[in-house]
Image (cartoon, rainbow, N blue to C red):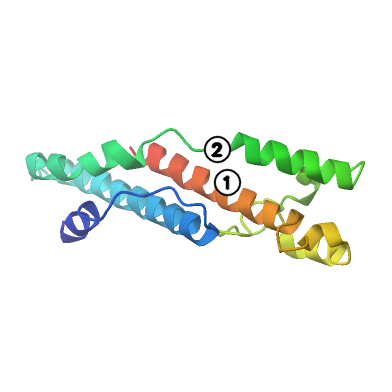
Amino acid sequence: MKVLLMFYYRRPIQPSVRLDGQIEACLQTKIAAFIAEILAMHLFHSRQVGTPSHVEDLVANLSHYIRFAVAIPNLNSSLHTQLKRNFEARYSGCTPEDLKLSPLEDRYLGKEYFFDLPLAEKMLKFDQAWLGRRDDGLQFEFQTANVNLSLVDAQVVSLVAW
């Protein structure tokens, strides 16, 4: 319960333009989902064994989830459309989906969540468009898309938890 109260009194998750800030939002949302799942299991178990938990104490603290953790997943469609357009214009016959990770590989929230950037790096590192002039090339676009998909996944997990 203390963990939930500490989590509740933190500032709401703020949108960020920095990748590190977006990754932090992903992790906070995932933590919220885990806490919600633990609370749901606690309530279920206490009901099963006949020692009802004081739901009134929990309801006040659950407003955090109502306001922030159960939002509509925030897929940045313009980011993904622009990535697709830029990638296909530069490498005809290829799509960003060609670089997605295999379902057999572990996925971690962050810059390497959905697209296989180490593989792309091996194939495209000699092309100037990959890094860009100021580290704003296709690699950055893929990292940003990975972070956005991480956030969407964390939000979906949060929705499923409740």
Q: Quadrant of the C terminus?
A: top left
Instruction: State the image coordinates of residue 61 (x, y, percent, origin top left).
Output: 17, 45
Q: Position of residue 82 (x, y in %)?
A: 72, 39
Residue 105 picture quarter: bottom right
Image quadrant holding the N terminus, namely bottom left
Identify the mark at residue 149; answer none if there is no mark.
1
Instruction: Measure how far apart labels 2 and 1 are at the Cα level.
Output: 7 Å
Residue 104 visible to the viewer: no
User: In the drawing, does residue 54 fall left or right of residue 36?
Assistant: left
Q: Residues within 10 Å of mark 1 (few under 14, many from 20)?
A: many
In the image shown, does 123 or 104 lie closer to the viewer? 123
Mark 2 touches mark 1? (CB < 8 Å): yes
Give the vertical position of 127 relative to 162 (above or below). Answer: below
User: Where does the image place residue 53, in percent across and percent down from the top left?
Assistant: 10, 45
- Residue that label 2 marks: 75
Question: Where residue 124 sits in the image (x, y, percent)?
Answer: 85, 61
